[in-house]
Amino acid sequence: MHRTLWILLTLGSAVSQAQVNPCDLNRDGAVNAVDVQLSINMFRYGLSCATAIYASGACNDIVTNRVVDAAFGKSCITGIPASAHRVSLNWTASTSPNIIRHNVYRGTTAGGPYTMVATVHITGGTSYIDTTVQGGGSYYYVVTAVDSNNRESAYSREAAAKIPQ
C-alpha cells in the first residue's frame, strides 16, 4: 500500500509540473491534425474561439498557421508580433439580434475582391489588428456581421490603408 501511495504522489507531481501547449486546442496532450482542423473550423465556420494564440478571442489565418507549425514540431508562437507594419481596425457592432461574430475581409483593390482574414467573436470586441500587411502596399477592408443562423450581412463601408515602405 505504501508503494501505491508513492506512485500516485509521483504521478501527481509530474502532472502538476506539465505545461499546456496553447496550440493543443483540444487539450489531449499533442498538437496534431485534430488541432489543425479545429483551428480551421474556428476561423472559417465561426465555431467557439477560445484561444489566445494570436489575441484573446481572435481566430484567423495566423492562428491556423501557428497551429500547423506546432503540429510539425515547431514552437507554438503566441501573441501579436512586434511588426513594423500593422493596420488597426475598429467598427461599430451590429444592432441586429443574435449576432455571434464579425468577419473581417481584406483586398488589395478598392471595391474588392476581398478575402476573409479574421473572425472576431462578439466576446472578442469590435476591433482587429492586421499585422500581415507589407510595406508599400494598399489594403482595403470590409466587415460583416454573422448571426446564430450563420446568415452573413452585406459588407460594411470600405476602409482603406496605405502602408509606408
Image: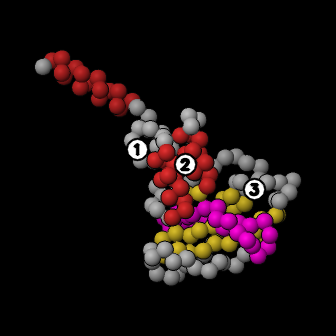
Magenta stretch holds residue 115: yes
Which type of secondary structure does the marked residue at label 1 adopt?
Answer: loop
- Which kind of residue does numbered mark 3 sit on? Val
Badge 1 or badge 3: first in the primary sequence: 1
- Give the residue at x 86% y 57%: 136
Which type of secondary structure does the marked residue at label 3 adopt?
Answer: loop
Q: CA distance from mark 1 to mark 2?
A: 14 Å
Give the labeled residue for mark 2: 53
Judge left or right: residue 147 versus residue 87.
left
- The quadrant in which residue 138 appears is bottom right
| Residue stretch rendered in magenta on the structure | 105-128
- Which kind of residue does numbered mark 2 sit on? Ile
Magenta stretch holds residue 151: no
Q: Is residue 78 visible?
A: no
Give the labeled residue for mark 1: 27
Q: In the rendering, which numbered label is found on residue 133?
A: 3
